[in-house]
Image (tube, rainbow, N blue to C red):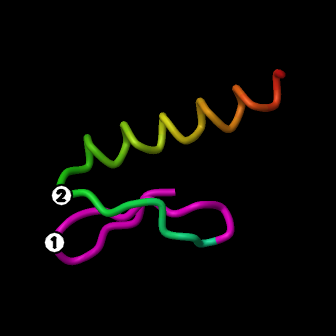
Amino acid sequence: MIKKIRGGYKVLSESGRNMGTYKTLKEAKNRLRQIEYFKHENKNK
């Protein structure tokens, strides 16, 4: 989940854990895409 905060965007896990803060929405979306990729990559092994 991406949440808008003062000064940028915060990527949060499903449990609410902070996964990083970014200045642009594009950077935040890219990071969220990376997290989802590795989450599903580990399940396939």
Q: Looking at the picture, does residue 19 appear above or below residue 44?
A: below
Front in this rendered view, residue 21 or 2: 21
Q: Work out whether 44 lies above or below 8.
A: above
For residue 30, above or below residue 4: above
- As drawn, which residue projects farthest toward the top? 45
Q: Identify the magenta region.
A: 1-15
Residue 22 place in picture, x, y as percent:
25, 57
Q: Residue at x 83, y 22 (%)?
A: 45
Going 60% across and 72% down the picture, which residue do you hit? 16
Q: What percent of the width, then of the height, locates residue 44?
A: 82, 22
Give coordinates of residue 33: x percent, y percent: 48, 35
Q: Is residue 9 magenta?
A: yes
Between 4 and 11, the one nearer to me in the picture: 11
Circles 1 and 2: CB atoms closer than 8 Å: yes
Q: Find residue 7 and name its label.
A: 1
Judged left or right of residue 35, residue 23 is left
- For label 1, the SS is loop
The amino acid sitting under disc 2 is Lys
Q: Residues within 10 Å of mark 2 (few under 14, many from 20)?
A: some
Position of residue 17 relative to residue 25, above or below, is below
Q: What's the amino acid at mark 1?
A: Gly
Image x and y of residue 32, in percent:
47, 44
Is residue 13 found left or right of 18 in the rendered image? right
- Residue at image position (59%, 37%) is 36
Report which quarter residue 35 is drawn in.
Answer: top right
Label 1: how many residues lie within 10 Å, few (<14), some (14-19) or many (20+)? few
The residue located at (33%, 49%) in the rendering is 28
Q: Looking at the rendering, which quadrant does residue 41 occupy? A: top right
Q: Counting residues from the N terminus, which is met first, the one under dot 1 or under dot 2?
A: 1
Per the image, label 2 sits on a secondary structure element best described as loop
Q: Mark 2 = which residue?
A: 23
